[in-house]
């Protein structure tokens, strides 16, 4: 795999973007999770079931929960396909990480690793814009 210090141009910019999104997602979502846990600390081990019950307590919550679940499933398919295409190991960890950490953390992390793989497999003759658009070597027509 190519090192970040060896990257230039679009690959480097995309890695910075994905890294910043993962950090922002972690900070934002973990602060919300900590606030929820502190507010509901009296529930003990029932805090997870309480969270799911509250998330599904009205139609707006059900809508958001269903939408995120469907997006998670679609992104899981994308991650498996891209993981196999690019040889990314442990794709299951990004998929399982979505409900455990947050989709806002696990997906940018996957995209970061994906961008590193794309940069590593790209040849110097390919324009940078073709690499980041998923047109890696062998997929051009």
Image (tube, rainbow, N blue to C red):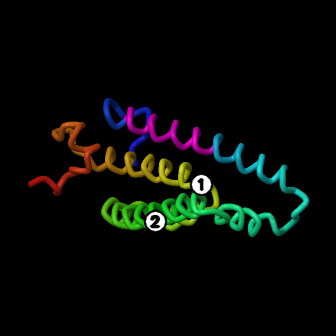
| Pointer 1 with pointer 2, Cβ within 8 A | no
Judging by the rendered image, the residue that carries numbered circle 1 is: 102
Q: Where does the image place residue 106, in percent across and percent down from the top left?
A: 53, 54
Which quarter of the figure is the C terminus placed in? bottom left
Residue at image position (62%, 45%) is 26
> Looking at this view, is 46 or 90 the one in front?
46
Judge the density around disc 1: few (<14), some (14-19), many (≥20) Cα neighbours within 10 Å. many
Residue at image position (34%, 37%) is 11
Question: Magenta includes 128?
Answer: no
Q: Earlier in the sequence, mark 1 or mark 2?
A: 2
Q: Which residues are magenta?
A: 12-26
> Looking at this view, is 3 or 141 the one in front?
141
31 relative to 134 in the view: left or right? right
7 relative to 39 in the view: left or right? left
> Looking at this view, is 25 or 41 the one in front?
41
- In the picture as drawn, the residue positioned furthest to the front comes out as 59
Question: Magenta includes 14?
Answer: yes
Residue at image position (44%, 36%) is 17
Q: Which label lies toward us, 1 or 2? A: 2
| Overall secondary structure of the magenta section | helix
Q: Secondary structure at mark 1?
A: loop
137 relative to 68 in the view: left or right? left
Q: Secondary structure at mark 2?
A: helix
What is the C-alpha distance between the residues marked 1 and 2? 14 Å
Judging by the rendered image, the residue that carries numbered circle 2 is: 70
């Amino acid at each position: 795999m190519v090192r970040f210090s060896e990257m230039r141009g679009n690959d480097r910019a995309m890695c910075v973007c994905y890294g910043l999104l993962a950090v922002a997602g972690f900070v934002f979502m973990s602060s919300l999770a900590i606030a929820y846990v502190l507010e509901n600390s009296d529930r003990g081990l029932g805090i997870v079931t309480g969270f799911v019950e509250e998330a599904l307590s009205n139609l707006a919550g059900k809508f958001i929960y269903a939408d995120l679940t469907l997006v998670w499933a679609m992104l899981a398919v994308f991650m498996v396909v891209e993981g196999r295409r690019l040889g990314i190991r442990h794709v299951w960890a990004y998929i399982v990480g979505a409900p455990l950490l947050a989709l806002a953390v696990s997906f940018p992390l996957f995209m970061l690793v994906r961008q590193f793989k794309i940069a590593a497999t790209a040849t110097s003759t390919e324009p940078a814009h073709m690499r980041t658009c998923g047109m890696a070597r062998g997929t051009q027509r």
